[in-house]
Image (cartoon, rainbow, N blue to C red):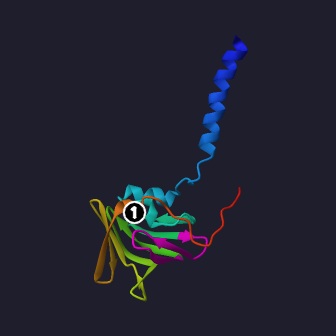
């Protein structure tokens, strides 16, 4: 009886452990968690964040990526490029003085200079021009295109 009870206790535990380790989505980096604290979805940054620095007094930040990165952004499939280093200033629901993210639209590359979180939407600023997209389109952090998954 004790062996049977032990069997029925260990099997569900092993099943739970195997399910939790099979999660294909990596844990968000500290930089991704900071985005959430300021009212933004994690999908504004790609998965390959190597590090970041944030001055909580001024809001100035630096995000380091392992390499430059290209991602196709939802919902309109705009191609975005991320530099190895992204800088800006973040406060609640607003990123300003953004440098290091560009998007291709209308046959030209445009630098995204700011992002505002406005209710259920994100408002992207490209100089004096803005574009509004649902925040839910950026709920997941995407992997850079052309990168292979590591097996470790």
- Give percent across and percent down for residue 97: 37, 77
Nearer the observer, 95 or 135: 135
For the N terminus, give its image quadrant: top right
Q: Residue 116, relative to residue 33: is it above or below?
A: below
Residue 123 falls in which quadrant of the image? bottom left
Look at 64% across and 23% down and name the residue there.
Answer: 9
Q: Can the viewer see residue 40?
A: no
Look at 42% across and 68% down and name the residue there.
Answer: 74
- Give percent across and percent down for residue 148: 66, 67
Q: Secondary structure at mark 1?
A: helix
Look at 31% across and 63% down and name the residue there.
Answer: 93
Left or right: 93 as drawn, with respect to 138: left
Q: How many marks?
A: 1
Q: Residue 24, relative to residue 132: is it above or below?
A: above
In the displayed image of the protein, which residue is found farthest to the bottom?
107
Does residue 96 show up magenta in the picture?
A: no
Residue 11 falls in which quadrant of the image? top right
In the displayed image of the protein, which residue is found farthest to the front?
76
Name the main secondary structure of what is drawn in magenta: strand
- Give percent across and percent down for residue 49: 55, 65
Look at 39% across and 63% down and name the residue there.
Answer: 137
Q: Magenta stretch: give its range.
A: 64-83
- Give percent across and percent down for residue 118: 27, 63
For the C terminus, give its image quadrant: bottom right
- Disc 1 crowd rating (10 Å Cα; few below 14, some 14-19, many 20+) is some
Left or right: 1 as drawn, with respect to 77: right
Q: Can the viewer see residue 90?
A: yes
Residue that mark 1 sits on: 137
């Amino acid at each position: 009886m004790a062996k049977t009870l032990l069997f029925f206790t260990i099997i569900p535990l092993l099943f739970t452990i195997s399910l939790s380790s099979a999660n294909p989505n990596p844990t968000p980096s500290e930089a991704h968690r900071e985005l959430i604290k300021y009212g933004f979805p994690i999908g504004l940054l790609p998965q390959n964040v190597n590090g970041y620095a944030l001055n909580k007094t001024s809001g100035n930040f630096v995000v380091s990526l392992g390499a430059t990165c290209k991602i196709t952004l939802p919902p309109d499939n705009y191609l975005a490029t991320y530099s190895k280093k992204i800088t800006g200033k973040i406060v609640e629901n607003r990123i300003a003085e953004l440098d290091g993210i560009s998007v291709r639209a209308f046959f030209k590359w445009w630098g995204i200079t700011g992002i505002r979180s406005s209710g259920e939407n994100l408002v992207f600023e490209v100089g004096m021009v803005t574009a509004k997209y649902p925040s839910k389109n950026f709920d997941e952090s995407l992997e850079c295109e052309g990168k292979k998954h590591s097996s470790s």
